Amino acid sequence: MLRMLTAGESHGPGLTLIIEGMPAGVPFAASAIDRDLARRQLGYGRGGRMKIEKDVIGIRSGVRHGKTTGAPIAMTVENRDYKNWESAMTPLVPGPETAIEDVSLYRPRPGHADLAGAMKLLDPDVRNILERASARHTTMRVAAGAAGKALLAPFGVRVVGHVLAIGSVEAKPDTADLDELTKVTEASEVRCADAEAAQRMMELIDATRRQGDSLGGIVEVIAEGLPPGLGHFAEWDRKLDARLARAVISVPAIKAVEIGDGFAASRLPGSKVHDPIHHDGARYTRPTNHAGGIEGGMTNGERVIVRAAMKPIPTLARPLASVDLRDHSAVDAGKERTDSVAVPAAAVVVEAAVAWELACAFLERFGGETLTEVTEHYQRYRERLSAF
Ligand code: EPS
């Protein structure tokens, strides 16, 4: 079983990820992780913080000479901004020169974790809550996703995320080819495969930023090359769609998840929703993929398609009404430096969340101590499947 844990505050010394259960012998390149970390940092609408940070992975254990060893993999990313926040975030007891009120935040932002977290901890200073609830920690979700991709890559599995909407602007990408989609998406400042919509998205972001406001959007992740039978039909917590939904909705600001046609399927009759079954002499084929590659909680061999809706970022340059948690007086919500739109970054984070969950399901199905054993289990299944 693969498992992982992340740690780290937004303005603390750095971020940590520990992965356990990765088989030995998986080719594992820091450069591939850095590429995904850099993709997450891009995107029109990001704020000043991304000019400070340049996320670079440090591999501390579990990888030797470019391959996993079977031991826990520990990875770190430094927060360059920490040097500007040391008095606020030092793990040491602060000296008399630190004015605690200056490094605390008492004005919760509607939509952020601030108020619910303050009531949970019964602490009027929301600093401890916002530091951990910040989307900064998604850096390590992306690193975990890159590790998941490293496990899946030898089996020809690809996972690609892109932006389908920002605010009211919807994209209509006209390609289903993953190479083409990837090429256009990687060249787009909003990670959108529809160039005309991308232009309108950037105009909308500019106008929204001028008004001190923020925007959400919709991202889509496509996974290609998965064998059938990942996940399980038998029990609620082993269903792959359930696991993907949990992984994706745990990404900050994600409020809804769809598999395949999702909500739209509820408005159509069954004859327009379910994908007919054919056989071409060599394998089962499906002329359509409304199911998004998952039936009965298992992959069916088609592309897995997951969409996620992101709400607008809660920190607003023109803040909403709030209350000072020390005396309950009416105040404007706190405003820290922020992004106005992080949907392009969310496409990379959701891609990583999906890749990680698929890697977990893959290893549960074909598990082994080494990549060689996993490959043998996978190939044996493929042989049996082709005769089925
Ligand atoms: C965030 C606020 C901003 C974002 C941050 C998430 O940070 P800061 O308060 O330092 O300007 O840039 O995202 C990241 C640092 C990141 O790496 O994605 C928030 O409040 O959630």
Image: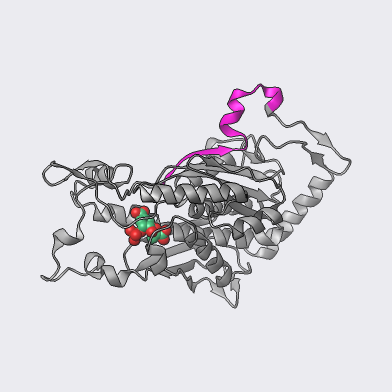
Residue 157, above or below 253:
below
Q: Which of 202/242 is in front?
A: 202
Q: Residue at x 79, y 46 (%)?
A: 385
Q: Residue at x 44, y 57 (%)?
A: 138
What range is drawn magenta here? 252-272
Q: Is residue 54 visible to us here?
A: yes
Percent x, y of residue 168: 49, 39
| Left or right for 124, reference 73 | left
Q: Which of 254/355 is in front?
A: 254
Residue 82, above or below 151:
below
Percent x, y of residue 274: 70, 29
Look at the image and tell me in which quarter the N terminus lies: bottom right
Q: Which of 261/369 is in front?
A: 261
| Residue 269 shown in magenta | yes
Q: Residue at x 47, y 62 (%)?
A: 41
| Left or right for 30, reference 78 | right
| Residue 359 shown in magenta | no
| Left or right for 24, reference 276 | left
Percent x, y of residue 145: 54, 58
Residue that protrudes farthest toward the bottom in the picture = 65
Percent x, y of residue 107: 21, 48
Q: Which of 241/51 is in front?
A: 51
Residue 268, above or below 117:
above
Look at the image and tell me in which quarter the C terminus lies: top right
| Left or right for 280, reference 9 | right
